[in-house]
Image (cartoon, grey):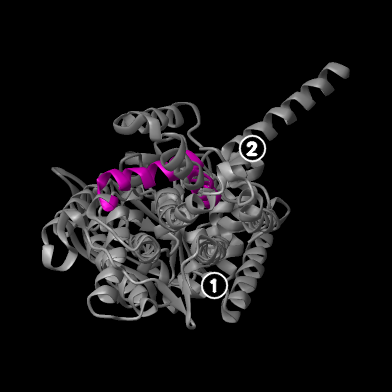
Amino acid sequence: MTMAASRLNAPILRIEGLEMRFGGVAALQGIDYEVPAGIIQAVIGPNGAGKTTLFNCISGMVKPSNGAISFDGRRIEGLAPHRIAGFGVSRTFQHVALFRKMTVLENVMLGRHSRTRHGFFATGLRLPGMRSEEKLIRQKALEFLDFVSLARFAELDAGTLPLGKQKILEIARALATEPRLILLDEPAGGLNMRETEELGDLIQGIKELGVTVLLVEHDMNLIMDISDRVLVLDFGRVLASGTPAQIKEDSAVIGAYLGVEIQC
Amino acid sequence: MGRKNRLILLGTALFIGFFPVMVTNIKAVSHYVDVMVFAGIFTLVSIGLSLLMGYAGQISLAQAAFFGIGAYTSGILTAKFGLDPLLAMPAGMILCGLVAWIIGMPALRLRGHYLAMATLGFGVIVNIVLGEEVNWTGGPSGMSDIPALRIAGYKITSDIAWYYLVWGIVFCVLIFCLHVIHSRVGRALRAIHEEEKAAECMGVPTARYKVRVFILGAVFAAIAGSLYAHYVTCINPSSFNLMWSIRFMLMVMVGGMQSIWGALVGTVLMTFIGNEWLRMFAEFEVLVYGSILLAVALFLPGGIVSLGSIAALRSRKRASALEDAGS
């Protein structure tokens, strides 16, 4: 089924010859890859393989030294993050980056920013259009909170939530931007087993909404359970790619990364 | 804007409304109406600065310069060209907004305190120009004979009329800002202050927002400058120098920069301290300001408005301690 999906769908993300150097260190070198729309694409690799750097390049937080990134046929490399977000790419962060002193609901409401428009004058004078927009922002944000089952925490400060819930809240905030591609950077980090299972269900729910998921994760069970395709990075290069089953059998991957410990 | 803010607004409006009635009958403090006119004018400047400091996390040392540009634009256009003061004021606002845009664009695109440095330089330049362009500004001795404000044929001259005019404008600006803060724009500003990178990735054009807050602050300062010029009718460059920019910053910090109310409380308090209670220190005034700044930074970083929440927290703690002891 996954092979059929990759044959049917045009790529939503195309990476060509991507290079990222920090001084003398090459974090990414010559990455060529395509992600078909509508799948869960995992990105794995040892620490320092360049996974987060890849995310930072796609979301615009760093400007690649070389190469091209196209989202839905549009070149996005080197653009400001807020513009890329506007096109429909959203992300979460490895180290939770919530607005801690804002409420849970306000965090998600902020996610609506690029889908709304009223500025200083309209909000300062409370023009009618702005009021109805504000109501809609709240209503939509509550829907997204409901989708990730955090609605009952809406009025708490985001910083007071336990880490597991904060990670989920980041996903809700990212979803509120109505992305077509969402980048999840180690969403299971710091989660216990039950929370990780729920996260797996949530990510599959996101896929069912029609959003393509790019997932960096260390939890192999989660990766093997939910992803349609896996990309393995090692020292900034593509080591292997394929279905989870193919990756499990790939000798290069086993040698470089998975070792002999994997249980399947 | 929330129930709490509405209540505070109502309370403040009542106090400001009845203040002249309370003080005018008491001889020793009857001139407090005049002090409060100045406090209101300065509040317009400090509200803009508090948005910039508290929400965009940036410091500007040019607020006195914008205040000065507003004052001199009004002064020159009305005294030398006979323009209506009500037209001169928007001219000053537009000029200040443009200048702020030109300075803010490059300085606010960079992370760090580049705006503080850029505005420091700009403030000094403006002060030199005001002092040297004798033909236009009257030089160091300043310009006088700035005509009084006229609204719908009525000349505004008495302290009481000025008091209600200035504070009316302050309340309009205050309500405008409260609406902005409790909206999409305000959430974006708070998000920028807390996690700039995350805000940017969620679609907030962070540099653009910082520039706009800076422009808004400059425009408010221009309104204040224009009112000041028509109220005192003679102005000179020493009211718009770096020391005044620092005073505006101090007003915001003393009141508490996390809240727009802090700007109001801090400004009124500092104006009374500066205009009334510190007269005896004369030249040592600067020393006192320095000490106040130091004390606030060390012991009350949240400013005066944080006293309320600290007290609430203490009483809650005491209540829970009592409960623990009881059980």
Q: Along the horizontal axis of the image, is A32 left or right of B249?
A: left
Amino acid type, mark 1: Gly
Looking at the rendered image, the quarter that the C terminus of chain B falls into is: top right
Describe the element under mark 1 as helix, strand or loop: loop
Magenta extent? B239-266
Q: Is residue A109 visible?
A: yes
Circles 1, 2 touching at the beta carbon (< 8 Å): no
Which quadrant of the figure contains the N terminus of chain B?
bottom right
Q: Residues within 10 Å of mark 2 (few under 14, many from 20)?
A: few
Q: Which mark is residue A83?
A: none
Camera-nearest residue between A91 and A106: A106
Output the chain of dot 1. A
Circle 2 SS class:
helix
Furthest-bottom residue in this view: B152
Residue that badge 1 annotates: A210
Q: Residue furthest top?
A: B325
The image quarter containing residue A14 is: bottom left
Q: Position of residue A174 (x, y in %)?
A: 51, 60
Residue A96 location (% of width, % of height): 49, 45
Please tell me whether residue B182 is drawn above or below residue B248 in the rendered image: below
Kindly identify the amino acid type of the residue bearing the numbered disc 2: Ser
* Magenta span contains residue A38: no
Residue for badge 2: B309
Do marks 1 and 2 share a subunit? no
Q: Is residue B103 left or right of residue A55?
A: left
Q: Is residue A201 visible?
A: no
A176 in relation to B245, above or below: below
In the rendered structure, the answer to whether residue B250 lies left or right of residue A70 reads right
Q: Which residue is painted at 68% across and 52% down in the image?
A: A155
